[in-house]
Amino acid sequence: MKKYIYLRIVLMSNFFYAQIGVGTNNPEAALDVKNDTYGTLFIPRASLTSIGDKTTIVNPDGTSLAESTLIYNDGLSSLKPEGFYYWSNNNDSWICMTCKNDYGDVTYSLKTTDFEGWYLLDGRSITSLPDNAKMVAQSLGMTTNLPNTLDKVLKGKTPSETITSSVGSNIISISQANLPNIDFTGTTSSTGNHNHTGTTSSNGNHSHSYTDRGNSTVNANYDNRGDSGTIADDTSSSYTTGTDGNHNHTLDINAGGNHNHTATVNSGGGNTTVNSTRLSLVTNVFIYLGEK
């Protein structure tokens, strides 16, 4: 099959310019490629070893990469997804023009199975993944299993935490140390008759009064029969006992009148754990490991 390339050179007074037409005799641009059968342009393919890889693609003269150099990364290096990249001197790296996702991106979805390079984070062994996805997972630090997001939410990593590790719990147990430090006060009811028994203290001097019926005697005729007997006279006197000697008195306290009782209140707790899961919309979580 013959292929024709049309080159038109226009000479001006001080300069000339050229238009190149491939498959056309009337190029409408500096390079005009027309073909209804084959692809019109083939961009060089490469497997980038890093986002700043300058050795896989080099300029013919050995100089640094030219701004906007265009390549197609096949994604086989597992470092960046497949797609068209251009070189940026300002960023000193390859910039993907067609990548919708990057390796390690995580998303929520209502889908239930792997799709288009997205893999369900269900804790499965990475040996079950396709070779390229397995390589990507290992490059992201998942050496044995994918993380399992069952009944978990995502959180930002702290300096002391390990990426993809599981922390926290959906249930908590409250101990006495978790309760606020407060005092409960109250007064019991004084209604209802009841008694208190006790023993008074033996300390302190005090006196008791008593009545002496007398100790003199007279002979009297009881029955007019000449019988006589000894009887006490009818005199009486009041005396006070001494205050010496310790002794006790048993007493009953009248229930009348208001008074207080100190009480102990039982919390009645059963040490039941608390579910800390918030009201949530249930979805699945996927990670992007590439489509190959």
Image: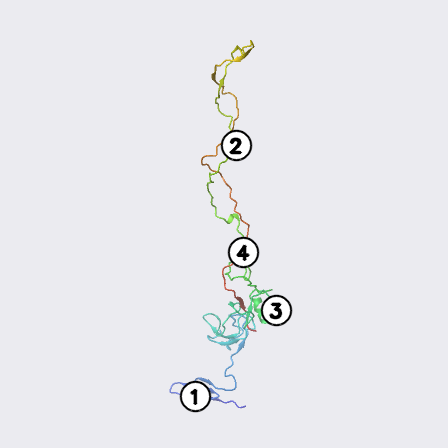
Of marks 2 and 1, the one in the foreground: 2
* Mark 2: few/some/many CA within 10 Å (<14, 14-19, 20+): few
Instruction: Indicate the amino acid at tag 3.
Output: Ser
Instruction: Indicate the amino acid at tag 1.
Output: Ile
State if disc 4 and disc 1 touch (CB < 8 Å).
no
Of marks 2 and 4, the one in the foreground: 2
> Circle 2 — which element?
strand
Residue under numbered circle 3: 128
Residue under numbered circle 2: 197
State if disc 3 and disc 1 touch (CB < 8 Å).
no
Q: Using the numbered discs, state the Cα–Cα distance from disc 2 to disc 4 in whole angstroms.
A: 52 Å
Q: Using the numbered discs, state the Cα–Cα distance from disc 1 to disc 3 in whole angstroms.
A: 60 Å
Residue occupying the point 50% across, 31% down: 252
Instruction: Indicate the amino acid at tag 2.
Output: Thr
Q: Identify which residue, 43 or 112, lies in the foreground.
A: 112
User: Can you tell which mark lies on residue 171?
Assistant: 4
